[in-house]
Amino acid sequence: MIICLINPNTTERMTDNIKSAAERIASSSTTIIATNPKSGPESIEGYYDEVFCIPGIMEEVYSNKEADAYIIACFDDTGLEAVRTITDKPVLGIGESSFHIASCLAGTFSVITTLEVSVPILKSNLLKRGFDRICVNVNSVDVPVLDLENDSSNALSMIENEIVRSINEDKAEAIVLGCAGMADFAEKLEEKFSIPVIEGVSASIILAEGLVRMKKNTSKLGGYSYPRSKKYSGIYKAFEFK
């Protein structure tokens, strides 16, 4: 089985870390192709950054047609639904995958993300998929994505404080870490707080492997139908669907 894991930003160091997290959980028979666009923002923080990631994501899908499934490794699920229209293979986002796994393990959960600018996006995604009924809060720790790997950012301590608050005030029974860059924190946090702590890379790998083994494909009826053939102009001409 081949799973193509696409980091939508251009920071290769983050791509390598995401790949490591994926390989820790993937079956020994699964090959992980981890990649990122060659152009676009170095991190994804809000609506503006998302717009400039999607063409690069599409290019990575087209460049890795041998994959059995694709994972969009941004917690905002950037471009997820657009990618589902260009392939019948399973396409998962780490945000949506985390919500599904959390709903299997707890009656309520909280999402802890990086910056406040991402909170409205995640709340919208939760509402769209119906998880707003069991997600009791979405909060940020005000740490930029690329600072998560910087010890001086004190990110882990800030996440721990937010977990304490979420348990005591929001009555969260599980925690979802709302950024691919938080993947390395999950095991330590789960051990400390003795509740499920879900990170999206592992959640999406498990679901992707299961869907491939079940031989399930993306429906081509309705919204995920293949795009109609039409002319694209200028720099987007390469994206004409044929």
Image: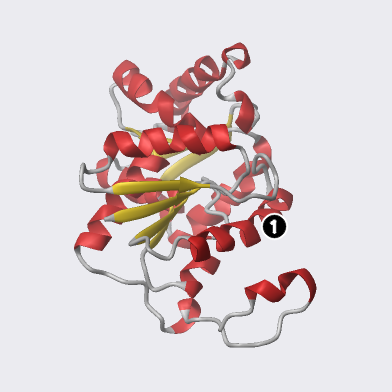
Tag 1: Cα neighbours inside 10 Å, few (<14), some, or many (≥20)?
some
Residue drawn at 43 percent across, 65 percent down:
65
> Is residue 26 depicted above or below 214 in this figure?
above
> Quadrant location of residue 146?
top right
User: Residue 34 at x, y = what percent?
Assistant: 45, 45
Which residue does the image show at 26% across and 41% down from the upper left? 105
Question: Could you say which quadrant of the image residue 242 lies in?
Answer: bottom right
Residue 151: x percent and y percent?
Answer: 57, 13
Query: Looking at this rendering, what residue extends furthest in the top direction?
Result: 152
At 58% across and 80% down in the image, what residue appears?
Answer: 241
Kind of residue sitting beneath label 1 = Val
Viewer can see residue 211: yes
The x and y percentages for residue 197 are 35, 31
Query: What percent of the width, then of the height, locates residue 175?
Result: 40, 33
Give the side of residue 139 with respect to residue 132, left or right: right
Q: Report the residue at 50% width, 18% height from top.
A: 156
Work out which quarter of the rendered image holds the N terminus and state it: bottom left
Query: Of 198 and 168, which appears nearest the observer?
Result: 198
Question: Colour scheme in the image?
Answer: secondary structure
Q: Is residue 28 above or below residue 156?
A: below
Please name the residue that numbered disc 1 is placed on: 51
Closer to us: 31 or 136: 31
Above/below status of 220 relative to 51 = below
Task: Please state which of residues 100 and 233 is positioned toward the viewer in this rendering.
Answer: 233
